[in-house]
């Protein structure tokens, strides 16, 4: 790809606006007369590549004529979590397509998709005159999950209210889509357990953790 540093503000993409209806997103932006084409780069917000790592396989060429016909750019929200759109300005010069290296984020916009639901339940088995009790956890997920996404937290005297409110324990196996029931564990009768995201708000952008 033929990259070039932007020499004029007229070469920049800016003022991106979005309209979302159902699963369709409509983008509009300031398109200078100095710009012949744009490259559309679409990625999940967590896996965005820096500009210098982008290749033509990562990009979709979009013309001014397509923009006029669609009154903008039409795309679909087809992923869990946030999707990023970066619009790269281009010029055709001497038969070559020049891509401008716009280093600010005026050409970047984020679209929030749906969240994947994760349901969990926790049940206890108390035995009379026993100092310990058994715990059975169940996790139901719409998508396969990495084992490090979730942790369970144990607290003495009450149910934990956050991932920092007790002792944190990892899960040892991945979670396939559907229902997973880890082996029962034993805890003291005055202890309680709850399941949380390991990285808190970051995972909450893509997943919804729902107690049953």
Image (spheres, grey):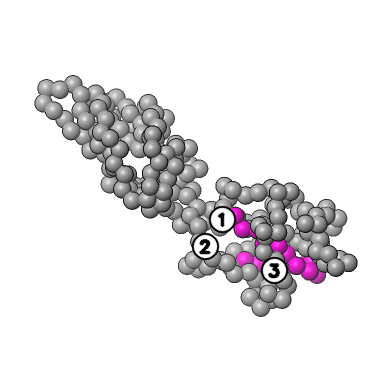
Q: Which mark sits nearer the N-terminus, 3 or 1?
A: 3
Q: Are marks 1 and 2 in contact (CB under 8 Å)?
A: yes
Q: For the residue labelled by badge 1, is the local secondary structure a helix, a strand or a loop?
A: strand
Check disc 3: other Cα within 10 Å, few if <14, some if 14-19, many if 20+. Answer: some
**17 vs 201: above or below:** below
Residue found farthest to the right? 94
38 in the magenta segment: yes
Check disc 1: other Cα within 10 Å, few if <14, some if 14-19, many if 20+. Answer: many
Q: How many angstroms separate mark 1 from mark 2 (CA)?
A: 8 Å
Q: For the residue labelled by badge 3, is the local secondary structure a helix, a strand or a loop?
A: strand
Q: Are marks 3 and 1 in contact (CB under 8 Å)?
A: no
Q: Is residue 8 left or right of residue 174?
A: right
Q: Is residue 61 left or right of residue 77?
A: right
Q: For the residue labelled by badge 2, is the local secondary structure a helix, a strand or a loop?
A: loop
Where is residue 100, by image quadrant?
A: bottom right
Horizontal and vertical percent position of residue 4: 83, 55
Q: Is residue 173 left or right of residue 101?
A: left
Magenta stretch in the rendered image: 27-43
- Determine which residue is flagged by label 3: 62
Q: How many angstroms separate mark 2 from mark 3 (CA)?
A: 18 Å
Residue at (63, 75) in percent of width and height: 70
**65 vs 75: above or below:** below
Q: Nearer the viewer, residue 85 or 58?
A: 58
Residue at (44, 53) in percent of width and height: 115
Check disc 2: other Cα within 10 Å, few if <14, some if 14-19, many if 20+. Answer: some
Where is residue 136, by image quadrant?
A: top left
Work out whether residue 48 can be spotted.
Answer: yes
Res 77 label: 2
Work out whether residue 211 can be spotted.
Answer: no
- Determine which residue is flagged by label 1: 83
Q: How many angstroms separate mark 3 from mark 1 (CA)?
A: 18 Å
């Amino acid at each position: 790809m033929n990259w070039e540093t932007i020499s004029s503000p007229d070469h920049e993409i800016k003022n991106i606006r979005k309209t979302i209806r159902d699963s369709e997103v409509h983008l509009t932006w300031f398109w200078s007369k100095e710009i012949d084409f744009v490259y559309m780069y679409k990625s999940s917000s967590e896996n965005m590549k820096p500009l210098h790592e982008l290749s033509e396989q990562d990009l979709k060429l979009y013309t001014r004529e397509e923009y006029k016909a669609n009154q903008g750019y039409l795309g679909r929200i087809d992923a869990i979590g946030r999707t990023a759109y970066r619009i790269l300005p281009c010029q055709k010069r001497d038969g070559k397509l020049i891509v401008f290296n716009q280093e600010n984020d005026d050409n970047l916009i984020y679209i929030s998709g749906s969240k994947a639901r994760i349901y969990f339940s926790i049940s206890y088995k108390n035995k009379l005159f026993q100092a310990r009790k058994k715990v059975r956890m169940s996790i139901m997920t719409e998508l396969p999950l990495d084992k490090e996404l979730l942790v369970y937290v144990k607290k003495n005297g009450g149910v934990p209210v956050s991932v920092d409110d007790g002792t944190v324990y990892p899960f040892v196996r991945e979670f396939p889509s559907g229902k997973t029931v880890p082996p029962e564990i034993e805890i003291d009768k005055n202890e309680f357990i709850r399941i949380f995201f390991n990285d808190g708000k970051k995972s909450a952008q893509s997943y919804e953790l729902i107690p049953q």
